[in-house]
Image (tube, grey):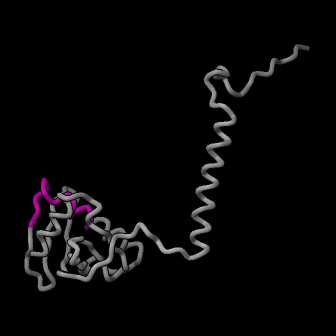
Amino acid sequence: MTTAQIRPRIHAPEKDLVPVVLVRMMFSLVGLCLMMVCINVWIGRPVVSAPPQSPIAVERMMFLHGKMDGSARVVDANGTLIKQFSAEKGGFVAGISRVLDRERTKARVALDGPVRVVRAENGRLAIFDPSTGWGADLMGFGADNSAVFASLLK
């Protein structure tokens, strides 16, 4: 009988492997971060990374109709056309429309409800969907994208 040679499962040279000490330190750091998050949740510490709250300066209810090619149409609560976006200019509005459709589908509500676009006194823009409770601070998407929604409030 011949004895089979046992080959190591790792075929890389020892000098190319990550040292065990560094792997343990990495998992310790992940565990420490997880522990800090859990402690802050358990003691009820408020979220400090939320956008600053400010009174509403301007708000408008509108309907977003986006297409997969990037074009979009925005109408107000009366059905009056606010703005028509071409495929080259309406990508962000069409993307927000798709997000709304997905959130409404998850919540099992009608897909054709209005959204509320708000400009606060501190200049921040946000969009809210009253039917699902979903909302987003539009300032986090960049100046150009938030300017598109700012133009809809005029």
- Does 96 lie within the magenta span? yes
The single residue placed furthest to the top in the displayed view is: 2
Q: Do we see residue 61 in this rendering? A: yes
Q: Do we see residue 117 in this rendering? A: no
Q: Which residues are magenta?
A: 84-97
The single residue placed furthest to the right in the displayed view is: 1
Position in image of residue 69 (x %, y %): 19, 56
Horizontal side of 22 relative to 101 (left or right) equals right
Task: In this rendered view, identify the residue nearer to me: 64 or 57.
Answer: 57
Horizontal side of 50 relative to 58 (left or right) equals right
Position in image of residue 146 (x %, y %): 20, 64
Q: Tell me what residue is drawn at x 34 percent, y 70 percent.
A: 51
Work out which quarter of the rendered image holds the N terminus and state it. top right
Task: In this rendered view, identify the residue nearer to me: 55 or 108.
Answer: 55
Q: Tell me what residue is drawn at x 64 percent, y 21 percent.
A: 15
- Does 147 lie within the magenta span? no
Q: Tell me what residue is drawn at x 26 percent, y 66 percent.
A: 138
Residue 140: quadrant of the picture: bottom left
